Amino acid sequence: MYTKRIGKKLYQVELNTGGIKQLICSYIIAGSKPLLVESGPTNSVPNLLLGIQELGIAPQAIEYVAITHVHLDHGGGAGTLLKHLPNAKVLVHPHGMPHLIDPRRLWSSSQEVLGFVSEIFGKPEPVQEERIIPLTEGTFDLGDGGKLCVLETLGHASHNLSFHESFNGGVFPGDAAGTYIPDCDVVVPTTPPPFYLDLALASLDKLIALKPSALYFSHFGKADDAVNRLRDYKVQIQLWADIAEEGVKHNRSLEQIRDNIIKQDPVMTIIADYVKAHRIYSKTVLENCVRGFMDYAKRKLEKQQS
Ligand SMILES: [Zn+2]
């Protein structure tokens, strides 16, 4: 079983990318006009197709694949997926569109930043321009009286979108609300460089204003108590930013700043061992995300000095 029902007309698909469970999921909103959220990475597109099959949805019935952003783990598989969905178009932020049409630069920079993780995700294939709908807002008919609203939620990436679905009132934040670790019921930052704290905080306010009933994390799964989680995430990223700023001012290394974060963030003190032992999160959360805050802190410091 790849799919799990998580709400009215709403299914989560475990992509099991690289054989790793609870890392990345896609979602299917199965109204009379079925829509996918996140293609996921190239290497797990076959699992997503099996999930679609499991629900008895005909591939030609899918009109839209909404991707929150083009990073390999969210939209990297779009080109491969569309080969199997003859009538589908991709919804993406305009700044992400060039990377779907020609993913070569995205692939080389991902290899640089993610190292071995990029190989687990797989190389993206191009999407034909006429199959892309660039947008920063809009509403899509899901059939059966449902609709999907698009919101611009920048910060994690310069082109992160979130989607609100009306069947249950939940939100797909992409990486705008952190990474949810369901086993431990906590959220940790997802903030690789270039990370923009002010934009990220403003995006979280935008999501809080919607009063969503749930968050559907791409990493990983549905979490209730959405508004409190979004508020807590604001506090958490502000704390990481403060620790990084203090560290950068004192020329501390990435490892020292990381260790200070683990000591001072009450969530990290609980989850540090789990994250350290995780094949992917040890690289992304404890290295790239800390680097994102250091990069933010350096930019802020340079601005103050100039
Ligand atoms: Zn991600």
Image (cartoon, helix red, strand yellow):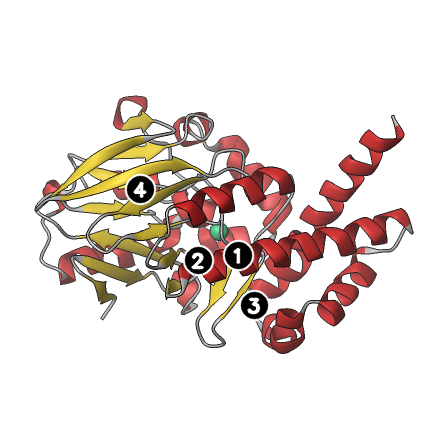
Q: Secondary structure at mark 3?
A: loop
Q: Earlier in the sequence, mark 3 or mark 4?
A: 4
Amino acid, disc 3: Arg
- Which residue is farthest right? 250
Q: Earlier in the sequence, mark 1 or mark 4?
A: 4
Residue at left offset 29%, top offset 38%: 149
Q: Residues within 10 Å of mark 1 (few under 14, many from 20)?
A: some
Residue 231 drawn at (x, y percent): 53, 56
Q: Which residue is mark 3?
A: 279
Question: Foreground mark, 4 or 2?
Answer: 2
Q: Earlier in the sequence, mark 1 or mark 3?
A: 1
Specify the label residue 227 is tagged with: 2
Residue behind label 4 places its C-beta within 8 angstroms of ligand 1: no
Answer whether labels 3 and 4 touch (C-beta < 8 Å).
no
Answer whether labels 1 and 2 touch (C-beta < 8 Å).
yes
Residue at left offset 21%, top offset 35%: 140
- In the visual, does 299 lie left or right of 186? right
Q: Residues within 10 Å of mark 3 (few under 14, many from 20)?
A: few
Q: Which residue is mark 1?
A: 231
